Structures are given as C-alpha cells and as structure tokens.
Amino acid sequence: METSLLSRSKGDRVFDAVNYTFLTLVLLASLYPLVNIISSSFSSSDAVIAGRVWLLPVDPTLEGYAAVFKNKEIWRGFSNSLFYMIVGTVINVIITLMAAYPLSRPDFYGRNPLMFLFVFTMMFSGGLIPTYLVVRDLGLLDSRWAMILPGALSIWNMIITRTYFQTTIPQELLEAAQMDGSDDFTFVRKVVLPVSGPIIAVISLFYAVGHWNSFFNALLYLKSEDLFPLQLVLRKILIQNEISGEMIDAEQAAALVGLRDLLKYSLIVVAITPMLVVYPFVQKYFVKGMMIGSLKG
C-alpha cells in the first residue's frame, strides 16, 4: 500500500486534490441546506425572520415544535403517511417478488412476451386521465387504497429484483431442491427469500420513500382531509401559507408571521426525520443489492 502511494505521479496527486476539493464542495452544498433548516427549526422566530440563522441555532427554543405537535392536523397527516408507507410498502414488496421471481426463471413459459409487456407499460403509461378513470371506476376514490393500489408495482424495481434473482440463485440450486422433493413455493420460502435480504431491503426503502413523499395522488384521489398524508398538510402550510387557529394561542397571535416561518422549518424536519432514521439501517445493503441487481438489464 505504501509502495503504491509512493509511486503515484504528480498528475495523480493533482487529480486527487481536485477530486477531493470538488467532492467536498458538493458535500457542503448538499449538507448546508439541511443543517440550515434544522438550525432554523430550533431558533427563535425573531432570529428566523431577521435571517440571522446560517449554521447554528440562534436563541435556541422548541417553540416551533411545540406548535407543530399541538396541531391535530399534523398528527393525523403523520399517522396517515405512516399507514400508507407501511401497508403500501408491504404490498409493493410482495407483488414485486411475486412478479420478479417467475420472470427470473428460464423455464417460465411466456417469460419474454410478459417481460416485454411490463417494459412497454413502463415506457408508455396510460396517462393521467385514463389512470384517474380506472381508479374512479374501481371505486377507490377518496379511500386509503387510492394511495396504495395504483402504484402497487414499480416495473423498474421489478427488473432490478428479477436480475438479482437471476445472478444470485443458480438453476442448479433449484434442481437440487426439486430432487429433494421441494416444490416451487417451498423453494421460494426456504431458499429464495433468505438469500434476498439485500434486494428486499433496497426496494423496501425505495417504496417507503416514495410513499412517504407522495402527495400528487392525494391531490387527485382524496377529498376527505381525514385521509390527507403529511406531505399534503405540509404543502398546505408551505405553499398556501395557511396555519390553522389551533396551532397558535392568543399570545402567539401577535407573532403570527414569525411563528409561521418557524413552523415551516419545524414541519420540514418532522417530515424528513423518519427517512433519516430508517436510511442508516438499510444503507449497508445498497451496494450489494443495487450492484448485483444492475449487472444485467
């Protein structure tokens, strides 16, 4: 290792310096907005309005979070998003595995035509209005299932999972299991699923993030505010600049403008916290799951 470092040319060292400098700048540019939002959420409303927060909290306070968690609309949106994320991800993963495994088997009759149809729908979707009409005719409008079933299968994730199965589970393993009297369901349950942890973790995170950040389907399909996800509540406050009366009391009314800005930062932190907590536990599977799944198309 030391020999390799000593033999590096001047051009290599210049390249490394430029590379490290560039990556450091990209890291700072990516990290600073997050740090600024978190610091602003813990700062006083006066400091936020005056623009005095740039790195660390100024006049630290939990005033914004107290107002956020006092609001029933936020809690309802949070619980709805949690429901859509958990139930939706479970359904997504089950359907993805059920579609990917048969398509990974070379002896599956009609595999290529089915794969063509899957890819075709990925490139040429029906569009917004036909999709809405299908959801309406299925009676899913203004129901929780409208947030889950229309996107129950991601073709891209299915292709990645299928490729993972093709490269990880050899045909000889299936033949050996069949010689021992194992049927397909037993083989999937006892062999395929135990060795598929990385790809299941990766697609679960993809689906979970998608559900947690989803708000467009809610705009289209939901009318009842009781079913609104957190992102729609967040959008209402951030874009429409609306704050319900229960989020503030009489004493805070005079500082409504400052509290409104403070609430925005606090809400953003509340909305991104679940994903920030989950990601480190799944990140270790990313390299193995994504690299193996992307070897072949």
Image (cartoon, rainbow, N blue to C red):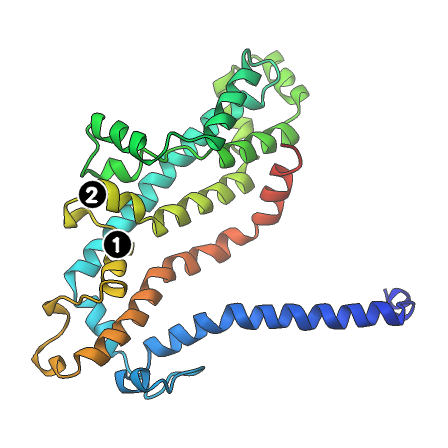
Would you identify the image quadrant in which residue 134 lies?
top left
Q: Residue 202 vs residue 126: left or right?
A: right
Q: Position of residue 73 (x, y in %)?
A: 17, 59
Q: Position of residue 78 (x, y in %)?
A: 25, 55
Q: Identify the residue at image location x=29%, y=43%.
A: 217
Q: Position of residue 263 (x, y in %)?
A: 26, 72
Above or below: residue 277 compared with residue 216: below
**What type is the residue that disc 1 sits on?**
Leu
Q: Is disc 2 in contact with disc 1, using a CB cutoff of under 8 Å?
A: yes
Where disc 1 sits, the SS reads: helix
Label placed on residue 222: 2
Q: Quick one: 41 or 116, which is closer to the camera? A: 116
In the rendered image, is residue 187 in sight? no
Q: Identify the residue at image location x=58%, y=23%.
A: 104
How dense is the environment of label 1, judged by Cα within 10 Å: few (below 14), some, or many (20 and up)? many
Would you identify the image quadrant in which residue 223 lies?
top left
Q: Position of residue 183 (x, y in %)?
A: 52, 14
In the rendered image, is residue 132 in sight? yes
Q: Residue 283 vs residue 24: left or right?
A: left
Q: Quick one: 76 or 119, which is closer to the camera? A: 119
The mark tally for this picture is 2
Give the residue pinned by disc 1.
232
Q: Quadrant of the N terminus?
A: bottom right
Q: Quick one: 130 or 180, which is closer to the camera? A: 130
Would you identify the image quadrant in which residue 96 lies?
top left
Label placed on residue 166: none
Q: Identify the residue at image location x=29%, y=33%.
A: 129
Q: Identify the residue at image location x=31%, y=37%.
A: 148
